[in-house]
Amino acid sequence: MLTRKNIAIIMGGYSSEYQISLKSGNVVFETLDSSKYNGYRIHIFKDKWVYVDSNNAEFPVDKNDFSVRVANQVIRFDCVFNAIHGSPGEDGFMQGYFDLLNIPHTSCDMYQASLTFNKRDCLSVLKPYGIKTAESFYVNLGDTINEDNIINKVGLPCFVKANKAGSSFGVTKVHKRENLQNAIDVAFKEDDEIIIESYLDGTEVSVGVITYKGKTKVLPITEIVSENDFFDYEAKYLGKSQEITPARLSKELEDKVITEAKKVYEVLKMKGFSRSEFIFKDGEPYLLEMNTVPGLTRESILPQQAAAAGISLSDLFDNAIQEALK
């Protein structure tokens, strides 16, 4: 008889995205194949790391070895399923911690998480490989803001984004020069580094790439049609967008973006889940960013894409654990 593996599903986190992460984590918990796995919900917050049982009772996690004591039993984990969006699950901290403890986890490695979480650094690493990106301008907290220089470089409209934040927190689309400073202030509430990018007017697509049964697999592409001015928080989570899977692309455009998304995944030596956003400009895909812990709720894009590829949620999560345990 197979012994069931203990799987810690980490969720929550320290960023504005914690509520979405709790949703993702609970979907993983509810969906894991209970004939193969014992799932444990682990909430990771700044003030506490706790195991939450079915009665919502909390048991502290021993950070020395990431174990939990319940009654007189010490629970140790065979694998960690990472469902933390944002810090510390998507920026390399948890990856480094689990690597030091030698506990397998479903996300990419520490360096890859840290690099992809930093939009500016990620785009500059990919540029020499011919990956196209928007024109951009960098500002750090405390820098003198020269609006002329910014607008001369990126034009209007433009996007002002927190460099290290997800779920469109700290992102503003700026149409007029007089709104630029306010957008910069909003972004600085999320991060002390910002990236200002030229607006690319074209079809936006989201491309899931995963390691599936040992191979890099590009999932069916999703086209994003936002009712709002861009694919912001409301569009992502409050239904203010249409997500069309598979995307309405010509075969030529589809092939181009599949090639680019796979190249990005492989150049960065990624593992586990990823979701990259691209915009087509003049028939070429331009990379916006990559997420390494994408949303895993039933409404989220990556699960929709997996379903279109004939991969159930249970199979998607099972594969992630099996890949990690290799």
Image (tube, rainbow, N blue to C red):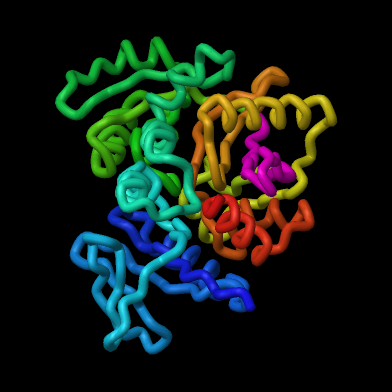
Q: Which residues are magenta?
A: 202-222
Q: Is residue 261 above or below residue 29?
A: above
Report x, y in % for residue 313: 65, 63
In the rendered structure, the answer to whether residue 267 lies left or right of residue 48 reads right
Query: Residue at left 58%, top 51%?
Result: 323
Q: Is residue 143 above or below residue 32?
A: above
Query: Residue at left 56%, top 63%?
Result: 297
Query: Residue at left 47%, top 67%?
Result: 7
Please say whether residue 209 is one of the residues in the magenta stretch.
yes
Q: Is residue 31 visible?
A: no
133 and 41: which is toward the camera: 41
Considering the whole magenta stretch, tell me its main secondary structure: strand
Q: Is residue 168 visible?
A: yes
In the rendered structure, the answer to whether residue 290 lies left or right of residue 217 reads left
Farthest-out residue, front: 1
Query: Residue at left 27%, top 23%?
Result: 139
